Image: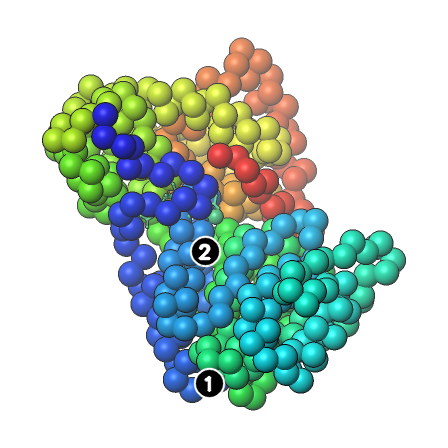
C-alpha cells in the first residue's frame, strides 16, 4: 500500500491546498506593505468560517508566507482559561529572544521589563517562563492593554532593528477568548496598529460569530477586515480529494470521486475524512485506482465514526430550543437535506415565534446548519440529518418538550450566542 496522503485532522496541513487564493493574496499584500513601509498594517485580517472549513490551515499558510518574507512570526491559539495578553506576549518573547541575544539593547531591556508585569520572564539563555498568578494579583484590564500594546510595539521595532521586516502575529480561535480578554486584545491592537514606525501585521481566525464578539469588545473592531472561508464548490472538492492521491501515484475512478465530493457538501474536513477512509478500504498500491466500492465503504465508515463521535457530541451541546429546530429542519428537509423556512415554521407549529431567529443564528454560528439560498436552511454535514431523525424512541416526547421551551428561549437583546465547545473532532 502506498502511504496514505490524506490529513483528516485538526489543523493538519493538506498535501494539496485547494482554494483560499483570495485570503492568501490579501495577506501577502499586507505583508509586503508592512515590509515596504516599516509601518503597521491598517487593520487585522480575520478569517472566519465554520468548524473544519480550513481556518487553521489558511492561517498557517499565511504564517509561512510571513516567515518567507523575513518577519518574526508568532502563532497563538486563544482559549477560555488563559490570559490572551499573557499568551501573546510570551509567544512573542520566545520568538524575539534569539534576536535580542545577538546584542542586548535598550529595546530588549524595556521589553523584558514590560512583560514582567504579566509575570513573564526570560532567562539569559532565552527560555521564557510564564508565572502562575493568583486571580487577585492579575493586572487590571487597563494595565494588561497597555502592557500588551507596548510590548508588541517594542517587539516589532526590535525585530526591525535586528534585520527582520517586522512582527507578524497569528491568533487562532479568537472567539474563545473571555470577554475581558477580548477587550484587552482589541484595544491593545488599536494602540499597536496606530503607533508610529511600528512594523506589525495581525492575522486571526475564528468562528462566524467572532465579528460580533470583537465589536462588542471594542469599536476599533469595526475596522478589522473579515474574510469568510466558504465551503468548496464541486470542482474544488474533487481537486482536494483527488490531488493528494495523485501525488503518491494513485488515481480515482471519476464517478467515485464525484460521489464523495458531493457527499462532502464542500467541507474540507469531510473531503479529508472520506479520502482517508477510502484509502484504508482500498489499500491502493502506487499505480492503483480507488473505486466506487472504496467510496461506498468510505461513506459507511465515516458515517459510523461521525454517528459515534461528532454527532452525539453536537447534540449534547444543543439547548432544547436548538434541538427542536434541528428536528423540525430534519423532518421537512428534501432529498438534498434542504428545508424552506415556511416549512420549518409550520413544523414548529407556531409561525413567527420570537425565539426562532436567535436559535437559528446560534446553530449557524456553531456550524451545525448553513443558510442555503433565500429562506432555506440545510445541515452542514448531510449525515447529521439522519442522526437527528434517528435520535431514539423517546424523540417524540423530547420533541414536544423541546418545542414548548423554544418560545421561552429568547435571550436579552445584545447577548451573544454561546460559544461552541472545541475538540469535537
Ligand atoms: N485549503 C484546503 N485544501 C484542502 N484541504 C484542506 C484545506 N484547508 C483545510 N483542509 C483540511 O480540512 C480539515 C480542517 O482544517 P482546519 O483544521 O484548518 O479547519 P478549521 O476551520 O481550523 O477547523 P476548526 O474550527 O475545528 O479549528 C483538515 O483535515 C485539513 O487538512
Ligand atoms: Mg482551527
Decide which of 78, 384 is in the foreground and name it: 78
Taking the spot 59% from the left edge, 80% from the top edge, the residue there is 103
Q: CA distance from mark 2 to mark 1?
A: 28 Å
Is 52 left or right of 111, judged from the image as shown?
A: left
Discs 2/1, front = 1
Q: Position of residue 262 (x, y in %)?
A: 25, 35
CB at mark 2 closer than 8 A to ligand 1? no
Taking the spot 42% from the left edge, 87% from the top edge, the residue there is 37
Is 16 left or right of 135, judged from the image as shown?
A: left
Decide which of 384, 59 is in the foreground and name it: 59
Decide which of 266, 100 is in the foreground and name it: 100
Is 353 left or right of 284, judged from the image as shown?
A: right
The quadrant the N terminus occupies is top left
Is 175 left or right of 43, judged from the image as shown?
A: right
Q: Position of residue 56 (x, y in %)?
A: 45, 51
Q: Which of the colour schemes (rainbow, by chain, secondary structure, one colour) is used?
A: rainbow
Visible residue check, residue 287: yes
Taking the spot 53% from the left edge, 32% from the top edge, the residue there is 314
State the residue lying farthest toward the right: 136
Q: Position of residue 419 (x, y in %)?
A: 60, 46
Rendered position, 186 above or below 4? below
Q: Position of residue 188 (x, y in %)?
A: 64, 73
Element marked by disc 2: strand
* Marks 2 and 1 in Cβ contact (< 8 Å): no
Residue under numbered circle 1: 38
Element marked by disc 1: loop
Visible residue check, residue 289: no
Residue 213: quadrant of the picture: bottom right
Residue 142: quadrant of the picture: bottom right
Disc sitting over residue 404 in the figure? none
Residue under numbered circle 2: 48
Amino acid at each position: 500500500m502506498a502511504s496514505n496522503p490524506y490529513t483528516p485532522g485538526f489543523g493538519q496541513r493538506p498535501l494539496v491546498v485547494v482554494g483560499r487564493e483570495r485570503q492568501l493574496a490579501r495577506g501577502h499584500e499586507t505583508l509586503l506593505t508592512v515590509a515596504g513601509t516599516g509601518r503597521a498594517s491598517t487593520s487585522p485580517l480575520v478569517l472566519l468560517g465554520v468548524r473544519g472549513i480550513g481556518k487553521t490551515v489558511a492561517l498557517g499558510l499565511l504564517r509561512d508566507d510571513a516567515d518567507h518574507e523575513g518577519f518574526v512570526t508568532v502563532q497563538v491559539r486563544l482559549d477560555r482559561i488563559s490570559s490572551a495578553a499573557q499568551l501573546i506576549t510570551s509567544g512573542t518573547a520566545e520568538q524575539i529572544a534569539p534576536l535580542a541575544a545577538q546584542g542586548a539593547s535598550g529595546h530588549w531591556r524595556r521589553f523584558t521589563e514590560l512583560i514582567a508585569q504579566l509575570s513573564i520572564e526570560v532567562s539569559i539563555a532565552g527560555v521564557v517562563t510564564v508565572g502562575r498568578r493568583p486571580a487577585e494579583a492579575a493586572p487590571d484590564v487597563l494595565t494588561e492593554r497597555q502592557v500588551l500594546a507596548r510590548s508588541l510595539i517594542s517587539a516589532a521595532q526590535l525585530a526591525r532593528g535586528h534585520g527582520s521586516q517586522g512582527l507578524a502575529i497569528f491568533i487562532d480561535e479568537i472567539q474563545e477568548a473571555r470577554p475581558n480578554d477580548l477587550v484587552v486584545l482589541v484595544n491593545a491592537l488599536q494602540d499597536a496598529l496606530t503607533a508610529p514606525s511600528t512594523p506589525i501585521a495581525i492575522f486571526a481566525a475564528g468562528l462566524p460569530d467572532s465579528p460580533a464578539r470583537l465589536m462588542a469588545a471594542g469599536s476599533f473592531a469595526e475596522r478589522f477586515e473579515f474574510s469568510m472561508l466558504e465551503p468548496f464548490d464541486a470542482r474544488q472538492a474533487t481537486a482536494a480529494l483527488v490531488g493528494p492521491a495523485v501525488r503518491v501515484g494513485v488515481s480515482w475512478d471519476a464517478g467515485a470521486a464525484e460521489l464523495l465530493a458531493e457527499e462532502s457538501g464542500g467541507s474540507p474536513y469531510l473531503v479529508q475524512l472520506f479520502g482517508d477512509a477510502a484509502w484504508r478500504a482500498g489499500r491502493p498500491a502506487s499505480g492503483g485506482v480507488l473505486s466506487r466500492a472504496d467510496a461506498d465503504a468510505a461513506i459507511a465508515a465515516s458515517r459510523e465514526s461521525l454517528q459515534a463521535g461528532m454527532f452525539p457530541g453536537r447534540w449534547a451541546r444543543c439547548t432544547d430550543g436548538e434541538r427542536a429546530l434541528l428536528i423540525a429542519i430534519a423532518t421537512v428537509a428534501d432529498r438534498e437535506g434542504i428545508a424552506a423556512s415556511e416549512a420549518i415554521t409550520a413544523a414548529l407549529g407556531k409561525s413567527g415565534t420570537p425565539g426562532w431567529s436567535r436559535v437559528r443564528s446560534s446553530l449557524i454560528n456553531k456550524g451545525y446548519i448553513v443558510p442555503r439560498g433565500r429562506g432555506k436552511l440545510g445541515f452542514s454535514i448531510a449525515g447529521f440529518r439522519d442522526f437527528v431523525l434517528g435520535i431514539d424512541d423517546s424523540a417524540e416526547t423530547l420533541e414536544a418538550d423541546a418545542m414548548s421551551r423554544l418560545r421561552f428561549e429568547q435571550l436579552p437583546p445584545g447577548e451573544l450566542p454561546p460559544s461552541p465547545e472545541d475538540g469535537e473532532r
